[in-house]
Image: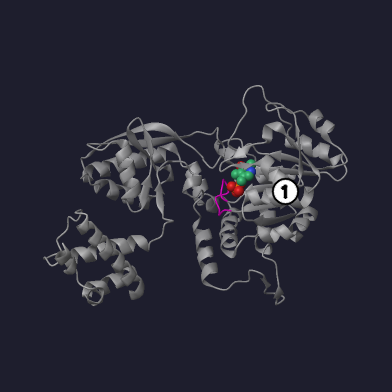
Amino acid sequence: MKETLQMIPPVHELQHHPQFADIVKQTRLDTVQLTKQLKIVIEEIRKAILQGNWNGPLPGTAGFIEELFQLLLKSATKEFSFTLKRVINATGTILHTNLGRARLSKTAISHVVETAENYSNLEYRLDQGERGSRHSHIEALLTKITGAEAAMVVNNNAAAVYLVLRALAENKEVVVSRGQLVEIGGSFRISSIMKESGARLVEIGTTNKTHLYDYENAITPDTAMIMKVHTSNFKVIGFAETVPTAELVQFTKTLDDVIYYEDLGSGALFDFRQHGIGEEPVVKEVIAMGTDIVTFSGDKLLGGPQAGIIAGKKTFIDRLKKHQLARVVRVDKMTLAALEGTLLDYARGEKAIRNIPTIRDLLRSVNEIDERSHAFVTKLLQKTTIFEANIFPDVSQVGGGTMPEVQLPTMVIALRHQSLTAEQLSRKLRIEAKPAIIGRIQKDEFLLDLRTVSKEEEELILEALANIETH
Ligand SMILES: *Cc1c(COP(=O)(O)O)cnc(C)c1O
């Protein structure tokens, strides 16, 4: 045993092997890092030999060096690769929070790349040669699109809610209907964020019903704000009643120094109702009703980067911009670039809007998905006969806690593998396919919904399915 181990060449000798240089090139590691990795691999081989778990050629025999370098390449590649990886979302759920929510539009992506590669006028006024504000880049577009007097952007909508409450209602009372005290995925609770902000929550009404008189009775000299929260991932049906925004705005106007704030959650800038999808009002309408402030996410229905958008009356937005916490929750230049790119698409009109991936996927017709699914199955069966494939009608979700009641009609490709269960197939596609492919499992069938899959990704899926190994 000892003699076998002694046949492993010393590190300095292996370092001069041409394969070592090859791996340096392939992995773009420097020799110091690769040498560290080499030592780890040698140690693992020694251990395996000592424990009798070594199946490769023994040291000193033909093929050992080859095997060693192969293991080195594998372990170095694994050790020095991204853990945040691209995946193919074949679930049909458009705003899949676990898969990164919205994908960005081409305009947004190229703007991010240019902004990342170069210096920019992030906080510099080119016309005056003076210090400027990072809010300025987004504000003009946002006010144009939403009709608000002023706007600003923070890290995400959770931060937006927090900043609004902290800056405008600290130590004061905020009136919220009980039916709107929701928890949004990832344990974001309105009641908890309110507590953190230092604002005092005044709950009114019941889970299913809140009337205008409930608001009227809750107003005290300490009331700073009436807040309405979009219930997002939750919907009360049946015997339910809330006070419409327009009525609450009118009521708030009769009060002194009370702000009307609406957390819209998703905040649609595009009217999906016109396409028969959901009942989400566009932000512009909510602003036009006279709301003082609204907040919404950048990466939900809007289809941009993670961000929180605050829009409304200038006097309040100015106070928010000046607040110390604005700095704590401020966005970086890449987010601003991505958001500016996305908003420019909105400003450019219908054609550009339809190219925002979130919008495009939401509007994708069942006919298109059906045709693409049939073409996909035909191609698949030409490549391999190891699958049984069926196409049947199903529904895609919007996701991200957005429009939970909406079921988008779709077609799914249901795959059965000759020897693998749906569970095993799914695992292989997650772990072995590059990029990983995420689908759905239903009744021992693996489902692909092409709604969220691009043409280019279809080819990658076909490739991966044809190359499934079943050893
Ligand atoms: C999603 C959501 C949030 C949180 O937004 P993020 O951008 O994910 O931080 C807050 N409020 C409502 C109503 C939401 O739907």
| Residue positioned 71% across, 43% down in the render | 262
Q: Is residue 375 visible?
A: no
Which x, y percent locates residue 86? 41, 54
Q: Is residue 157 above or below residue 107?
A: above
* Residue pictured at 77% horizontal, 28% vertical: 211
Check residue 433 for magenta coloring: no
Residue 213 rendering spot, x and y as whole percentages: 81, 28
Query: Which is more toward the observer, 290 or 10?
Result: 10
Q: State whether residue 233 appears in this view.
A: yes
Amino acid type at circle 1 is Ser
Rendered view: 440 above or below 468: above
| Side of 306 relative to 169 (left or right) | left
Front residue of 97/392: it is 97
Q: Nearer the viewer, residue 25 or 228?
A: 25
| Count of marks, rendered view | 1
Q: Which residue is mark 1?
A: 197
Q: Which residues make up the magenta segment? A: 299-306
In the drawing, does residue 358 fall left or right of residue 252?
left
Depicted 289 relative to depicted 455: above or below:
above
Name the quadrant containing residue 261: top right
- Quadrant where ligand 1 appears: top right
Left or right placement of residue 90 versus residue 289 in this view: left
Horizontal side of residue 454 vs 21, given as left or right: right
Rendered image quadrant of residue 130: bottom right
Q: Name the main secondary structure of what is drawn in magenta.
A: loop
Secondary structure of the residue carrying numbered label 1 = helix
Q: Residue at x 82, y 39 (%)?
A: 252
Nearest the eye: 124 or 410: 124
